[in-house]
Amino acid sequence: MTWRELRRFGHDPLEFIEAVSSRNPRGVFQLPWGVWCVNDADLARMVLRSPDFNRGMSHFFTPGLPTRAAQIHLGQSVRETLRARTPELRTALAEVVAGFPRDSHWPRAGIQLVYRAAAGLLLHPDTEPSLRRLLEQAVDGGLMVRAAHIRQRVRAETLRARLKPALTEHVTQRRAAPCTGEPRDVLDAVLSACPAEVTHREAADLYMLLFRSIVGNVGYSVGWSVLLAGLRHTSASPWPWPADSVVREAARHRPFVWMVGRTAPGPIDIGGVPLPSETNISVCPYLLHHDGSWTSPGTFRPERWAEASGHGTYLPYSAGPFTCAGAGIAHTLTTEAVHALADSARLAVSGADPRPIVTNAAIPRPFTLHRTVRTSTHP
């Protein structure tokens, strides 16, 4: 990747990807850093759904779990725990939002909102305060996504070096006296689903993976939703769309997961390009969400989700056998958070820029959300 390409990518990663894609109309093209990327909907569905590309275990959970069945069981355990506590989370989100300042700084406020609402579910309140403080620091300390700058990464690794042994020690204690009833928190759900051969450290790593997936993925998705809706709707009236449509459209327009990878099971010809075995092939949801099969693909239009036509391929949580196990719960929690913010309030944004910061995920650039609670005017 040349210095010029690196600068263009840093300025607007998605515009850069679109430009490279437009010069390669065959359905598959090579990015400057060597990865092959699919920009054709049919080829993308084949890569994500074909058994040939989806053998073995999901890379999301590895290393740590010994079998695909163990991965599925863990995903189900955590998903069921979250689903059972959704009413509690809905109430907690509304309570946290009620204490929000008029002006809040995002995307940090989004992950703080999700963490504060879900803190007791992520790690139950009786857990030692020192570990809970470390997890709270992790939310602001650069552990939710890979930081874009070296200084931020150094800070994150310093925090990780403190958090990992503390969490591993806590896992050791819990496994010595396991929960016998319903899971008290996400950690109980993880430990109840982990096979005995999974080490304490591996179990701690799996928990942190899911912690990031809940707090980071949902928090940043809330950020994209309020940012894009605020840029589109600038009048003093309430949003004209339901929260569900705003969240769906934000996930189309600016998908948090911007690349989904698979490995070629053998020599393969894809889009007329011969590729050797073990080639990494990526699907870019952003490109598929902005192709010509969508009506006005470049426009943020929550109203499209009430329309019967004009929809293309939609895969904010991947597709096929390795679709995110928590996709439904993530969408529900994001929608509940956005609804809590918009309910009986006027939302506006300033300092907003729709270009993402891209590392291992696409997150919003900093902006300010101005939230004015509407007062009742009964006579």
Image (tube, rainbow, N blue to C red):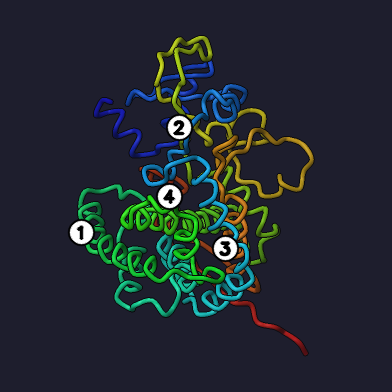
Identify residue type, mark 1. Thr
Disc 4, SS: strand
The reply to whether dot 4 and dot 1 touch (C-beta < 8 Å) is no
Point out the tag, 3 or 1, that comes first from the N-terminus: 3
- Tag 3 near tag 1, CB within 8 Å: no
Three-letter amino acid code of the residue under disc 3: Leu
- The x, y position of residue 365, in whole percent, is 40, 52
- Of the two numbered discs 4 and 2 in the rendering, the one whose residue sits closer to the viewer: 2
Does 288 sit above or below residue 99? above
C-alpha span from label 4 to label 1 = 22 Å
Q: Which mark is residue 261?
A: 2
* Circle 1 residue: 158
Q: Quadrant of the N terminus?
A: top left
User: Label 3 to label 4, Cα distance in Å?
Assistant: 24 Å
Instruction: Find numbered disc 2 in the image and state the secondary structure of the residue it sits on.
Output: strand
How would you rate the neighbour count of disc 1 (Cα within 10 Å): few for under 14, some for 14-19, many for 20 or more? few
Question: In x, y percent, where is residue 75?
Answer: 53, 51
The image quadrant that residue 169 belongs to is bottom left
Q: Amino acid at mark 2?
A: Gly
Q: Secondary structure at mark 3?
A: helix
Q: Earlier in the sequence, mark 2 or mark 1?
A: 1
Real-space CA distance between mark 3 and mark 1, rounded to the nearest whole angstrom: 30 Å
Please tell me which of labels 2 and 3 falls first in the chain.
3
Q: Nearer the viewer, mark 3 or mark 1?
A: 3
Asked which secondary structure carries label 1, the reply is: helix
Q: Which mark is residue 205?
A: none
Q: Which residue, given by chain and number where applicable, does mark 3 sit on? A: 82
Q: Is residue 238 left or right of residue 286?
A: right
Give the mark nearer the N terminus: 4 vs 2: 2
Looking at the image, is 76 positioned above or below residue 101?
A: above
